[in-house]
Image: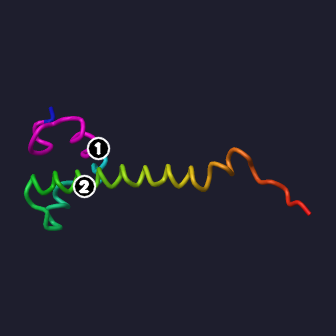
Amino acid sequence: CLGNIGPGPKDAWYIYCYIATCWVPSFFLSACGIRTPEQQRAWREKIGLLLIIISLMAIVGFITFGFTEVVCGTQPNRF
């Protein structure tokens, strides 16, 4: 059932990338100059990597800036 979604092996990585970029249909990529299925797969894998990187950045940002606020709350001012 996965035969016509793209070239190459249909492993978990490719399924993740295809689901993460399902909002960009192949005809739109063709209209933007990414014509061959190999180029489209490479573009989808690049976006998949970027989504993982952005997620990790969000986790580190939360740990750095938001974790103390969530755990400790706002402390009252001391005079």
| Scheme of colours in the image | rainbow
Question: Which corner quadrant of the image does residue 65 belong to?
Answer: bottom right
Q: Residue at x 33, y 55 (%)?
A: 50
Task: Decide if residue 54 is on the left or right side of residue 49.
Answer: right
> Which residue position holds label 2?
46
Confirm whether the magenta stretch covers residue 20: no
The percent coordinates of residue 62 (x first, y second) are: 56, 52
Q: Earlier in the sequence, mark 2 or mark 1?
A: 1
Question: Which corner quadrant of the image does residue 27 belong to?
Answer: bottom left
User: SS of the residue at dot 2?
Assistant: helix
Task: Decide if residue 13 is on the left or right side of residue 34.
Answer: right
Q: Residue at x 86, y 60 (%)?
A: 77
Question: Where the N terminus falls, by quadrant?
Answer: top left
As rendered, which of 21 and 58 lies closer to the eye?
Answer: 58
Give the residue type at disc 1: Ile
41, above or below 33, in the image: above
Q: Residue at x 50, y 51 (%)?
A: 60
8, above or below 41, in the image: above
Q: Residue at x 69, y 44 (%)?
A: 71
As rendered, which of 22 and 40 lies closer to the eye?
Answer: 40
Instruction: Please name which of the two marks, 2 or 1, marks the residue nearer to the observer.
Output: 2
Confirm whether the magenta stretch covers residue 7: yes
Q: Specify few, some or many for label 2: CA neighbours under 10 Å numbering under 14, 14-19, or 20 or more.
A: few
User: SS of the residue at dot 1?
Assistant: helix
Mark 2–mark 1 Cα distance, whole angstroms, equals: 13 Å
The percent coordinates of residue 20 (x first, y second) are: 31, 47
Give the residue at the far right of this rendering: 79
> Which residue position holds label 1?
19
Give the residue type at disc 2: Lys
